[in-house]
Amino acid sequence: MNVMSSLPLFMLLSQMPRSRPYTLASLRNEPGQPPEQLPGRLPGQSCGQPSGQPSGPSFGQPSGPSSGDLSGKVFCGFWFGWNPQVSLTSIPPEYNLICVAFVEPNAEGVLTFAPYMDEDEFIAGMESLKAEGRAVLLSLGGAHEGIILRESDKPLFKDELMRLIERYGFNGIDIDLEGASISAGDNQSVVPAVIREIKDFYRSQGKPFIVTMAPEFNLLRGYAAPYKPFLQDLEGYYDLIFPQYYNQGADGIWSDEYHMFLSQNDNEHKAEFLYTLTNAIVTGTNDFLQIHADKFVIGLPASPLSAINGYVENPDDVRWALDRLEAEGHGIRGLMTWSINQDSVNGYEFVQRYAPMIFNA
């Protein structure tokens, strides 16, 4: 046993350079032993957070294998059919979950989906991805703020989603409502109700159906968090949540541990931001709704041009955050990016940087 291995975990963390990844083995007193608890922390209590119960409602209780056909680690990317165009068959194999953008209003105001490419080519690409064992979801919304559903629209909305799922062979639905579309009309009740009915339909046939959401991280904060109705109404139905850690500028989270406000656009403290925000959400502290780690995926931009802000300059910041979460018993499911298309233009940097972290951890 060396001197460093005999120190408490808190001291080990504080003495390790943030730019150098640490591993589970480096945090153990002896090989094969579990990590120590942080001093003064109850089992399961988050680092740097008040003791006691989570500050917000808890969603996504651990349930073992996903209720869909997706298990293990997740490396997710959003794909779109417009420029820069990337064929479905050329998507790197590391992307085992693909969200196709987007269901949005057409010229007649009907919520539907168009692949922005030859339909036969799109269907062939879908079949190829599924034959490789990858899951492909249809994503609803995006930055489009013109999505307004009323209770009377529910039958048509459901029928159209079912038609698209059957026509193209999607494995599930992703909710990516943003801006005014989150709470417009009856969206917060109609969207969850329709998705529950669709998942129940496929469950009755013994078929898996994956449900995910990609909220901006600030939409998970506070008693009246905008995504709270979706999480509540889809409890027991959703499989993964991909909070977007981008486009929020100076927004962020206060850290008692670091005695500072960690903003999303502060590259100097990016590792601390990634860890602290994720830890707060998976433990339901710091006024965030709780999303359990086994259903949690961090969303990051694929390149500096993929989002207004939020790009991670140093990939070691991501590794540091992921390793620390794992060491503290809050290992998450994986990473998501917007977008596969922009990753392709950037030489698939996102795949090269992060797929080994997720699958070879």
Image (cartoon, rainbow, N blue to C red):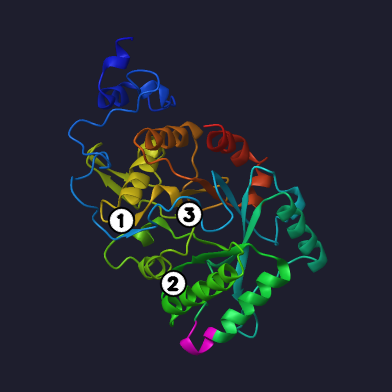
Identify the residue at the far top of this view.
2
The amino acid marked with disc number 2 is: Ile
Question: Which is nearer the N-term, disc 1 or disc 3?
Answer: 3
Front: mark 3 or 2? 3
| Cα separation between marks 2 and 1 | 18 Å
Circle 1 crowding by C-alpha within 10 Å: few under 14, some 14–19, many from 20 = many
Classify the position of the N terminus by image quarter: top left
Inspect the image, locate mark 3, and give the three-letter code of the amino acid beneath it: Phe
Secondary structure beneath disc 1? Answer: loop
How many callouts does the rendering have?
A: 3
Q: Are marks 3 and 2 in contact (CB under 8 Å)?
A: no
Q: Label 3: which residue?
A: 242
Q: Which residue is mark 2?
A: 182
First-in-chain label (2 vs 1): 2
Residue 255, position as x, y percentages in the image: 26, 43
Q: Could you give the CA–CA distance between mark 1 and mark 3, rounded to whole angstroms?
A: 15 Å
Counting residues from the start of the chain, the first of labels 3 and 2 encountered is: 2
For the point 64% across and 86% down, the residue is: 108
Give the crowd class for mark 3: few <14, some 14-19, many >=20 residues within 10 Å.
many
Task: Look at the image and give the residue range highlighted in magenta.
Answer: 149-154
Which of the 4 image quadrants contains residue 24? top left
**Residue 143 or residue 265, whichever sits in front:** 143
